[in-house]
Image: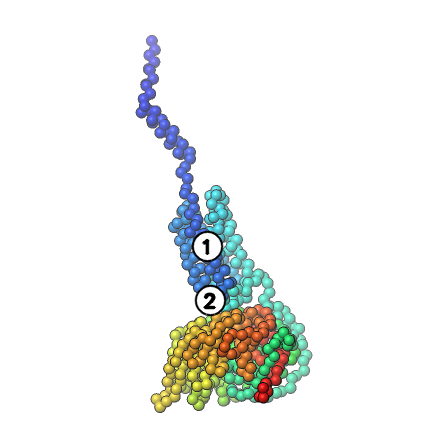
Amino acid sequence: MDITPLPEPITKIDQANSQTDEATLKVSDNPTRRKPLRLWPGVAAAVVLALAWFAVPAVIPEAFLYGLLVSFGAILAIVGWWVFFSRALWTERVGAVVLMAAGVFVTSRIIHISISNGSMGYLFYVLIVPVLCLILVIWAAASRRLSNKLRRASLVILILLTCGAFTLIRTGGATSKFNQDFHWRWSQTPEERLLAQAANEQAALASAPAAPSSTLSTSPGAETGTDWPGFRGANRDGIVRGVRVATDWSASPPVEMWRRPIGPAWSSFAVHGDRLYTQEQRGNDEVVTCYNVSTGKLMWRHSDAARFWESNGGAGPRGTPTLSNGRVYTLGATGILNVLKADDGSVVWSRNPASDTKVKIPTWGFASSPLIVGEVVVVATAGTMAAYDLASGQPRWVGPNGGSGYSSPQLVTIHGVPQILLLSGTGATSVAPGDGKVLWQHPLAPGSRIVQPGLTAEGDVLVHVGDLNEMRRLAVANGPGGWTVEERWDSFGVNPYFSDFVVHKGHVFGFKGSSIACMDLKDGQSKWKGGSYGQGQLVLLSDQDLLLVLSEEGEVALVGATTDQYRELARIPAIKGKTWNHPVVAGDVLLVRNGEEMAAYRLSRVAEPSSSQ
């Protein structure tokens, strides 16, 4: 007979094991959920970054540098949050950082040269890194409920679009507050539009009758009337003498005489009679040009095959022509010194001081304006002065190596001794005009000096340390033991970057950030500050206690040069575009220019008040 084994009895232990197996299966079918992303630290850092990078500079332009530092901290906070505290999958944490780095690297190889070279090569990274950090936070918050595949695909697309957008743009340069002049990469620059008109202009110039010869005679310190012989006037002090203008521009506004496009350059004007002289860049040629003051018509131009360009300031010469005895003296941004006949632009002689002094072209180009002293013309190749014989162009002397610098040599007389003063990377240097022998030197902290020195009535020298640092008053003395220099005070009361200042009635008037400020010469104490003009330039109408200010945005304003309070009397829009060039007032004509256009305005003159009043 068949014997069938009886089933074993089910024990409590077996039931427990069965329940455990079922639970294990359920756990396998429903894996443990990841903790949600920790978003709040990233969002908080992103808000700080957006405020510091975009909002603060727009509302408080002077706080731009502080905003930049805060932005850098916020970027580090976002990266730290994402890598260490976000709770994202490690593959996403590492993958996002690697993908962004790869996108930045590839994009940096194909962006426009103006972006890649901007801000000494840092512009692209300064722009794209904050944007990518903001994109990362926004993506993390918006995609947290998507599947892993969609999350990762959307991040790749966002990074590609962001990096790709930077390949489509170029910049025409930066303002003093780092605002970029962005355009589509394929759009024409103002210089390219000007070159397209050059053929017609050249034909008109060729058909014009020859101009009569003229003799120009200006010397440092001379009263020039309607003439303006070069950079910042006859004494390089930015003072207009013998001119009084109407200040009620609602009743008697400046009248536009003409306006015309011009090649890029930061050159100002030299004026004699009905002719003005300036420098421009026209394609691959550095150009000295002469125009009619009354009509703006081109009279002649001289070209050299040279081109200087850097992304922040753009292309073109930086120095201003100098007029003397029927000749025009110019120094180009690459170091070409030309001496031309003022009536027709023909070459008298030409040298390259950069080669003679063995000085390399500095970051922003050679910016010196030639100085005529006696029988020599003196230029500065960065921080090194070089003098040439006026008649032959032969080298006469070379001064000490002053390092970097963008200031121009200036003739001053201290305690009856004429001397040439230059601010450079090493400090202030004074030399004898005849042989370049050093009279005295005063060291300053290393930096790029741009602003011209000033001279007080007592013979003290005002120097700006540079790079938004303080101004100092130097007491210079000449005793039995030679020249001595002592610092009397330093002050931030007037604190320009590259905007020059003027000295008037015991006070200094100039820029402090983007405002105009007044400072007492006795102790450097601030008297007042007001207005907003960017990093513009100014001249002083001394007979009228009046500043004429050309703002960085191309507006012209009248500001009182008095010590009681800041007072703006009038303002008009004059030219469009970034304007760092010095304005010129020659008689009743106001001349303004920038890297795109120039214009002439007729100012209403007023009579000097009667002494009986």
The x, y position of residue 233, in whole percent, is 53, 82
- Please state which amino acid type lies under the numbered disc 1: Ala
The x, y position of residue 112, in whole percent, is 53, 62
Q: Residue at x 58, y 83 (%)?
A: 243
Specify whether residue 260 is in view. yes
The x, y position of residue 356, in whole percent, is 46, 80
Q: Secondary structure at mark 2?
A: helix
Q: Residue at x 34, y 13 (%)?
A: 4
Q: Are marks 2 and 1 in contact (CB under 8 Å)?
A: no
- Please state which amino acid type lies under the numbered disc 2: Met
Q: Quadrant of the N terminus?
A: top left
Q: Which of the 4 image quadrants contains residue 600?
A: bottom right
Residue 414 or residue 309, whichever sits in front: 414
Q: Which residue is mark 2?
A: 120
In the displayed structure image, the side of residue 607 where residue 147 appears, left or right? left
Q: Residue at x 50, y 73 (%)?
A: 516
Query: In the picture shown, does residue 184 fall above or below 538?
Result: above
Which mark is first along the chain, 1 or 2?
1
In the displayed structure image, the side of residue 83 where residue 613 appears, left or right? right
Q: Secondary structure at mark 1?
A: helix
In the displayed structure image, the side of residue 224 where residue 364 appears, left or right? left
Query: In the picture shown, does residue 237 fall above or below 497?
Result: below
Q: Label 2 to label 1, Cα distance in Å? A: 27 Å
Q: Which residue is mark 1?
A: 46
The x, y position of residue 422, in whole percent, is 44, 81
Query: In the picture shown, does residue 563 fall above or below 56?
Result: below
**Colour basis:** rainbow
